[in-house]
Each structure stands twice: as structure tokens, then as C-alpha cells.
Image: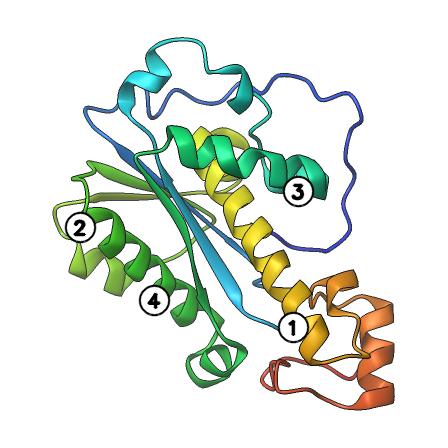
Amino acid sequence: MAGKRSYTVSSQLKPVSFEPLEKNADGPVIGLDEAGRGCLAGPVAVGFAVFPPELFQKELPDSLKMVRDSKLLNRSRRESLVEPIQKYSLCSGVIMASARSIDGKGINPTIENCMIQALARVRRQIQPVATLIDGNYRLTQLKSRNPDLRVECLVGGDNRVFSIAAASILAKVFRDKRMDRFDRYFPGYDFSRHAGYGTAHHRQKIHELGLSPLHRKSYKLKS
């Protein structure tokens, strides 16, 4: 899961050794991860990615070897991975929900609803055998709507499972691009700089300008 806007990115990235959960499955596995949970403004995004099981039976293509938790990659590396993730996946994408939805339903129900939409989109195209999710969620509604699907939440899943890592990259890239667009519609808040995270600069802008329609009114925004 994406937490803070700032993170340390190694200039010398080492190969990641993922757990062989997709390799050992008896069919396609969905990876899910969110970006923007802790932001003060903008949508929350849930990325999803499903890869053919045979992809994990051999060495990954070179273009996918940099896939890892999105927080360990700088923006240009994340963006460069979108095309190969889309190319090699059976199905992938991002579902977003607005600040208004978050304020109305709460962040966890909103994220769960995005995940439900993601699973529905995948299942219109393929029949997965499991979904692996970064974090620790109850997901009562998601499980009740998908009783035939094994659902497993994994703390630190974006570091452990390839499909979750790929989903984390998609969620982060497309949410950041959305915030770039919002920066043009709501000048002065510098959304392209902090993407809605609660940085000191962002909080100062809230103090100077007040709240925009993108801000989550249910969050603690002023201090």
C-alpha cells in the first residue's frame, strides 16, 4: 500500500525474489493493491493485475524484472513498467473512487468497493482461482459476492507477490497522473508536487487557500 509521498529509492536496484504463490496456483491469480489511502485530497486508487500462470514457470521477461513495490521505484521507472505490465497481463487496470465517496462511506468501505469492481471487471474476461491483496482487510462484502474465489490478504504483499507489486505500480502511476490533471483545475495547491499526501507543503497550502472540492473533509486536514 502506498503510505507517504516521500520514500527512498535505490539507484542500484537488485532483483526481487517473490514468493511463488502464482506459480503454485492451479489457475490465474489476481493481485490487488491500493494507492492514496492516507492522502488528504484526491481519489483512492485500486490497481489490479492478473498474469498467465505459465509466465511464472520460467524466468520473467527482462521488461518485467524491475517490477516491485511501487514505493521502491522513482516515478520514471514506475511509468516505464506500465506498458510491459499491460502487455503480459491477462487483465489489468485501476479503479478509483473520489474524495466525496470516501467522506460518505469511509476509506475502508470505499477501498473494498473498488476491489469489488476490480474483481467484477476481471471475472467478465477470465476465471481466476484466487485473489491476493496487500494489507489486512476484513472484506466481508467482497467475500460474500465472490464465494467461489479464495481471497487472501497479505501484510507487505507488495514486497512478496509479483501480481500485487504490479498492481501497486498501476495504482500509483494512474493516481499520480490524475492528480497532475487536478493540479491544472485547482491551481495553487501544487497537487502534482505532493499528489494529495499530507506533506508540510500541502498543509501550508490548505492553510493559505482553504479546502478544495478534492479534499477529504472527513480527514484531519488543518494540523
Q: Quadrant of residue 208?
A: bottom right
Q: Marks 3 and 4: in contact by CB < 8 Å?
A: no
* Structural crowding at the residue carrying mark 2, measured as other residues with C-alpha within 10 Å and reported as few (<14), some (14–19) or many (≥20): few
The kind of residue tagged 4 is Asn
Q: Quadrant of residue 175?
A: bottom right
Q: Marks 2 and 4: in contact by CB < 8 Å?
A: no
Q: Which labelled disc corresponds to residue 221?
A: none
**Please, is residue 50 above or below residue 24 in the view?**
below
Nearest to N terminus: mark 1 or mark 3: 3
The C terminus, quarter of image: bottom right
Q: Quadrant of residue 53?
A: top left
Which mark lies nearer to you, 3 or 2?
2
Cα separation between marks 3 and 2 = 30 Å
- For the question of whether residue 38 can be seen, the reply is no
Q: Position of residue 185 (x, y in %)?
A: 67, 79
Q: Position of residue 213 (x, y in %)?
A: 62, 87
Nearest to N terminus: mark 3 or mark 2: 3
Q: Marks 2 and 1: in contact by CB < 8 Å?
A: no
Residue drawn at x 41%, y 80% as measured from the top left: 105
Residue drawn at x 17%, y 54% as measured from the top left: 146
In the rendered image, the residue lying farthest to the left is 148
Is 52 on the left-hand or right-hand side of 58? Answer: left
- For the question of whether residue 202 can be seen, the reply is yes
Residue wearing tag 1: 182
Nearest to N terminus: mark 1 or mark 4: 4
Which mark lies nearer to you, 1 or 3?
1
Residue wearing tag 4: 113
Q: Marks 2 and 3: in contact by CB < 8 Å?
A: no
Residue wearing tag 3: 71
Q: Secondary structure at mark 4?
A: helix
Residue wearing tag 2: 124
Q: Secondary structure at mark 2?
A: loop
